[in-house]
Amino acid sequence: MNTFGHVFRVTTWGESHGPAIGCVIDGCPAGLKIDEEFIRREMERRRPGKWFASKRVETDRVEILSGILDGCTLGTPILMLIKNVDVDSKPYLKLRDVFRPGHADYTYWKKFGLRDWRGGGRASGRETAARVAAGAIAKQILGIFGISIFGYVREIGGIKCEVDDLELAMRLAKESEISCPDKEAEEKIVERIKEAMDEGDSLGGIIEVVAKNVPPGLGEPVFGKIDAYLAYAVMGIPAIKGVEIGRGFESARLKGSESNDQMSLRSGKIRFLSNNSGGVLGGISNGEEIIIRAAVKPTPSISKKQRTVNYKEMKDVEISVTGRHDPCIVPRAVPVVEAMVALVLVDLMMMQGLIPRSLTNHLQPET
Amino acid sequence: MNTFGHVFRVTTWGESHGPAIGCVIDGCPAGLKIDEEFIRREMERRRPGKWFASKRVETDRVEILSGILDGCTLGTPILMLIKNVDVDSKPYLKLRDVFRPGHADYTYWKKFGLRDWRGGGRASGRETAARVAAGAIAKQILGIFGISIFGYVREIGGIKCEVDDLELAMRLAKESEISCPDKEAEEKIVERIKEAMDEGDSLGGIIEVVAKNVPPGLGEPVFGKIDAYLAYAVMGIPAIKGVEIGRGFESARLKGSESNDQMSLRSGKIRFLSNNSGGVLGGISNGEEIIIRAAVKPTPSISKKQRTVNYKEMKDVEISVTGRHDPCIVPRAVPVVEAMVALVLVDLMMMQGLIPRSLTNHLQPET
Amino acid sequence: MNTFGHVFRVTTWGESHGPAIGCVIDGCPAGLKIDEEFIRREMERRRPGKWFASKRVETDRVEILSGILDGCTLGTPILMLIKNVDVDSKPYLKLRDVFRPGHADYTYWKKFGLRDWRGGGRASGRETAARVAAGAIAKQILGIFGISIFGYVREIGGIKCEVDDLELAMRLAKESEISCPDKEAEEKIVERIKEAMDEGDSLGGIIEVVAKNVPPGLGEPVFGKIDAYLAYAVMGIPAIKGVEIGRGFESARLKGSESNDQMSLRSGKIRFLSNNSGGVLGGISNGEEIIIRAAVKPTPSISKKQRTVNYKEMKDVEISVTGRHDPCIVPRAVPVVEAMVALVLVDLMMMQGLIPRSLTNHLQPET
Amino acid sequence: MNTFGHVFRVTTWGESHGPAIGCVIDGCPAGLKIDEEFIRREMERRRPGKWFASKRVETDRVEILSGILDGCTLGTPILMLIKNVDVDSKPYLKLRDVFRPGHADYTYWKKFGLRDWRGGGRASGRETAARVAAGAIAKQILGIFGISIFGYVREIGGIKCEVDDLELAMRLAKESEISCPDKEAEEKIVERIKEAMDEGDSLGGIIEVVAKNVPPGLGEPVFGKIDAYLAYAVMGIPAIKGVEIGRGFESARLKGSESNDQMSLRSGKIRFLSNNSGGVLGGISNGEEIIIRAAVKPTPSISKKQRTVNYKEMKDVEISVTGRHDPCIVPRAVPVVEAMVALVLVDLMMMQGLIPRSLTNHLQPET
């Protein structure tokens, strides 16, 4: 179950402290010119090394070993490989026989009978680098069809960002080191992250992602609905504990007359008068902006003392998780959520027949 | 995409106003004694006809046409058929050429180029009867392994239910007509629903479902994680706009030291000291209770005037959706959420090898 | 695993002596006018009751319970139901505790721990009626694109049919009660079948199916190749023991210079000078006729004495399988092979984006 | 569609003249000790460089970049990478604008709108190296359960090998450079291959693979039958044109009384008295040896003059395919067929619940 997607299928592989991580993309249309610089920029957004992030130094350079010829996709599987450059498993040695609270140590052990103790292995957030790489290809395909995806930090440590104008927010978030679209909130958030760092603690937050120009008709009822598919895609990102579409949990408190998006003609076209639905009706896109929010729990690696169990010796212990961890993973998770949304949209567009198998405007030989 | 599941696979079929609806279950273990009375009771919980629900009178009797012999599963596909008894498409005739706000009319039309105008067709909540039927089989399988699933109304129309003791809540919710575990809140909710009915309006709410005795090790990283799978299952239910696991969106506001569930030994067993994670770590069940909440939007069918478009004549119109609708679908959605959770759990248990292909303790012929 | 197909997906269900059998088709394009008379004719070709076939009298009338409105597909699942009318399980009672040689009795028992002893249950050839019903829908879709599928008996009981002109063969086979395109061979075959009947024995044979006007480009390397997919589809039909494409096993004895289909231009189009490949190169259709042959083993139900084991008493026994069986199933299997080929072609065309999700030339509302 | 398998899933990637080829194995049980020397030996059997094979010099060393720790599988995806060392695309430059007869050049072009002209790209037999690597893992798993797979050349260029004693054949075939179990036939075959080489031509043949100790109960009716699955697996290997199980096409000429495998008790166990069925009844393994044969067409690359079309200039041309090709691919295809059979068996065993998710006899921490 390391494959995502039905037609545009991404299989990720690799452990945090193994020689490399990466993915295979199967089902990518032929004839796509790969923009390697765009991939690099996307990787950069998720890359560790910033002040509020892990100090691990990774170049996150993506090597493509198959599926392209002269920079153009062949329609065959694309192997993307990212070497793990700065691996240091030593800090994990002393945690080898304990289950770190909030981590997958215990559950991997219960499931597989053994576990990769080096940096979380496959459960590490590092795996998401492969998702961003695959998402960068997906975004390029969407770009051909005028579809864009934009994510930003909605809230960190309880401090909410005010967003009135989405276009402005997009610009501000891009300029912000922590993808925050509200200057005032940003300052407070930075302060709070630093406090958490000082306390040896960590913070969570909320991310919002918006997809624009999504054509109506995407989503496959009744078990491949676009909202269900997005929820699946986003909830599967490490540390995500909640997902909502449009007004989400708020809509539980509205009346039908407040929640329904009414419709009318504008310049001869059918238009919705509001977008409480977040662009989804009956599990199918309605042409409005797709809006999805995700709750990110605080990073479980904290240096504060915590109780846990040493399972080799079967005794209670107290641990402090040191090493190179993110006091707040939320900003780095933004491109990951975007990537998953991009994968969903490309896949559904291919299922709906909106993306041809070949993007070449090739001169077919007459047959 | 009308099939749910990987190993225990449920395919639902049928339109609200067609001759019948139902499902095929493929991959059910052989040798399961089917308890038809239990299926009947589960169907009863979702059945329309109560004061706060649609006035459509359906018996919702499930006929099983294949996959069983002498009341016992054969391991072959189980066809479940529910006749549509009380169909009245007349009220929909006048809405035939308009898109009802909040409904899937517009999106189905955009996707398929035509739509079943009779009662919402496949997008009707009636489709979920087939899910409850399949879920009843899944619950019986889970019961063999001591796993139980219990759902209740957490909130309707903004009125929250207080739940301190889950065992008590379970008992109270079962006695409550609206699956409400808090007597005081129940009275207020009933009042509010009646108000909404009088106004020709509708209400939404929040449902919580708890699964007990779930073994650790369920969930298939990185794209078949139990939380992602649950989110997918529940978000795909009609009218659901948000899903959260454990502390969910609240955990975005916690610190790591508050959010992490610490561990210790108790009577020689490894135990979690809290369950903020809702029973899931790294996308794998940890043996604690699985807790999931879903936000239900208010029923879109309201008799209050709404603006929309007649697409045959391409002109703005105002409509009032009359007919037999639910002013509040939340209580009837409880067994549907439970059913989807049951389907997920059975499927993951089979993937983990915890449910044998045959439940018979048959005397194998020596070979 | 009772579902066939990736996009156009058919799930069959039902036991030979249960109340009904049938299938669900998921992924059928919307806007297809269903020709019920065509379905009836296809069912008739496979129907029992002819002199060389089982004496069971089935009307094999297909009821469609979902997925259509006013005779037109909605794009939602199509439930097809065929009642089992003439069920007589009595002759099987005395075989209840033995494994009939050549049948699936033993293997179903080993797999599921129990088995449906009534007429073979799910392993009965009766299950293929549902495939023919689904194939009839697939053929209608293919017809829109000018693709036709035609099968005939190539050989029965060792007597080969001569076929020089495929058009002529098609006409003769249609007129022949046993789908035989060679009058001379037909007489001998009928004679041989009658001999086998008199001996209480049965015969096998070879079926050839040809698909015309198949567009080039169908097939999904490297694990969804059209030849692999056809082999999978046809080998899974009961009683099939071999499958070959084009020259098949004969090509193992050719040289490269004899086997390769050379190419040249004709009226400005690229053409193959021969079709040894049977229309497939590198697992992708090349635009030539797809040619597939299947070996059918003789019906295992024979009245001749056979040794087997009574597994309740664990002792050797001799049995004679009486009841209503086919001395030669080959002619009735022809429409089944055709149906499976049709399912493969529709599925691959949808995967290649050659069949739209909606076949309506609907006037889209301007949005 | 570059993924094979349902539970034990192999995704292959890579072009013949790209930097590398390989595969990802997803779903491999945890706790398997990887025998790298065994992988090396399996790769060696398929490796080019022998007198009758392509002169391309590949080391075919398999690097494992993920999914293992200390030589033991983690239950996470296993990335296997094989560098393409000896790539020489020059001979293909002059064939860049023509379709080589018998190759996939034309069909890839029609499907994807462009093609990798360098050595056949993805359609090259080189892709099968990744299958052998994956198969080597599968064989190790099967070995734990006592299941072995053995293939040999049954026929080349029309010269048949006599096989009376399978154990003896196995030994002889292993000693034979061309996997031939019959010394006398081997000499004639070598002679014939040399003749074909001198003529600039090529030869095909037939391969038989036998799987021993396969437990009964494998196979998932009605669309995941073991014979259908094997046919799919083997027909998808490049150059295969026919597949048969047990007596195969021969059984079409038998009577039921000759074809049925009768049963009796031997030492208190149920036994079949013959194995015409090739170990499969009703699409489920019956505990006897699984026997499968595949027809291999002659290598399409021949230096003999052939007619084809230059599609850039749209004119008829004659070509001679020079370069490093195999005059007879049959012996090198033997381990490929074995590998595909191994993948099918492991997958079906996991589906039947016969292989646990974890092969560690780990000391589970008491919970």
Image (cartoon, coloured by chain):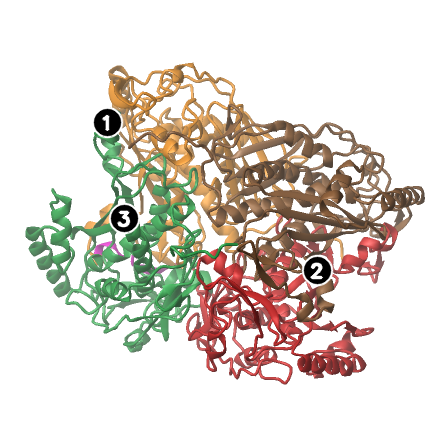
Chain colours: A green, B orange, C brown, D red
Q: Label 1: which residue?
A: A265
Q: Is residue A246 above or below residue C217?
A: above
Viewer-closest of B167 and D349: D349
Q: Nearer the viewer, mark 3 or mark 2?
A: 2
Q: Badge 3: few (under 14), some or many (20 or more) residues near its Cα, within 10 Å?
A: some
In the rendered structure, which amino acid carries the disc numbered 2?
A: Arg
Residue B363: x and y in percent read 72, 50
Query: Does the stretch in magenta take in C235?
Result: no
Viewer-closest of D310 and B58: D310
Q: Are marks 2 and 1 on the same chain?
A: no
Tag 3, which secondary structure?
loop
Question: Do the numbered discs 3 and 2 sit on residues whose CB atoms are within 8 Å?
Answer: no
In the rendered structure, which amino acid carries the disc numbered 1?
A: Leu
Question: Do the numbered discs 2 and 1 sit on residues whose CB atoms are within 8 Å?
Answer: no
Q: Disc 2: which chain?
A: C
Q: Label 2: which residue?
A: C247
The region drawn magenta spans B258-266
Q: Label 3: which residue?
A: A147
Q: Is residue C167 left or right of residue D76?
A: right
Residue at 9% from the left image edge and 50% from the top image edge: A182
Q: Quadrant of residue D285?
A: bottom right
Viewer-closest of B348 and D256: D256
Q: Disc 1: which chain?
A: A
Tag 1, which secondary structure?
strand
Is any atom of residue B109 visible in this view? yes
Residue at 61% from the left image edge and 84% from the top image edge: D50
